[in-house]
Image (spheres, grey):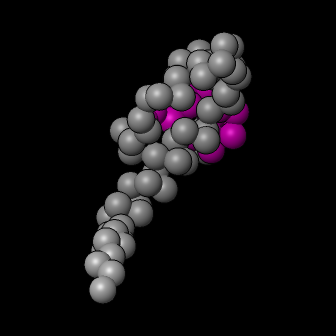
Amino acid sequence: MIKRIEVYKRTEKELEDHSLAEWAFDSHNWNETFPGYFTCLWCGIRHTSVQGITKEFPLCKENPILKKLLLR
C-alpha cells in the first residue's frame, strides 16, 4: 500500500495575500543590475531573488499609472 502526502490547499486568505504581494511586486519596473539583484527604475528600491515577497511589500510610489490614479 502506498501512503501519499496530503495535498496542501491554500485558504482564501492565503490566496488573497499572495495576490496582493504579486500586485505590489509587479507595480515596480525592475532592472537586473547583477545576476539576482534588481532595482526599480522608477523608485530605486532594491530587491534580490532570495528575498521573500509578502503582502507588506510596498507598491511603487513612482509608478506612473498609480500616480495618475491617485491624482483623481
Q: Is residue 15 left or right of residue 61?
A: left
**Could you tell me which residue is drawn at 59 percent across and 18 percent down?**
37
Viewed as shown, does residue 29 lie left or right of 7? right
Q: Residue 70: image x %, image y %?
A: 57, 40
Above or below, 20 relative to 52: below
Could you say which is closer to the camera, residue 72 or residue 53?
53
Q: Quadrant of residue 34?
A: top right
**Relative to residue 7, is residue 27 drawn left or right?**
right
Q: How many marks are shown on the rendered structure?
A: 0
**Magenta run includes residue 29:** no
Identify the residue at image location x=41%, y=63%. 15
- Residue 30 seen in this snapshot: yes
The C terminus lies in which quarter of the figure?
top right
Which percent across, then down, holds residue 16? 41, 61
Relative to 34, is 31 above or below? below
Residue occupying image coordinates x 38% and y 55%: 17
Q: Percent from the top left, x then y, of residue 53?
A: 44, 38
- In the image, 14 versus 69, the foreground residue is 14
Question: Residue 60's image quarter?
Answer: top right
Quadrant of the rendered image containing residue 36:
top right
- List the single residue furthest toward the front: 1
Q: Magenta region: which residues? A: 57-70
Residue occupying the point 68% across, 14% down: 33
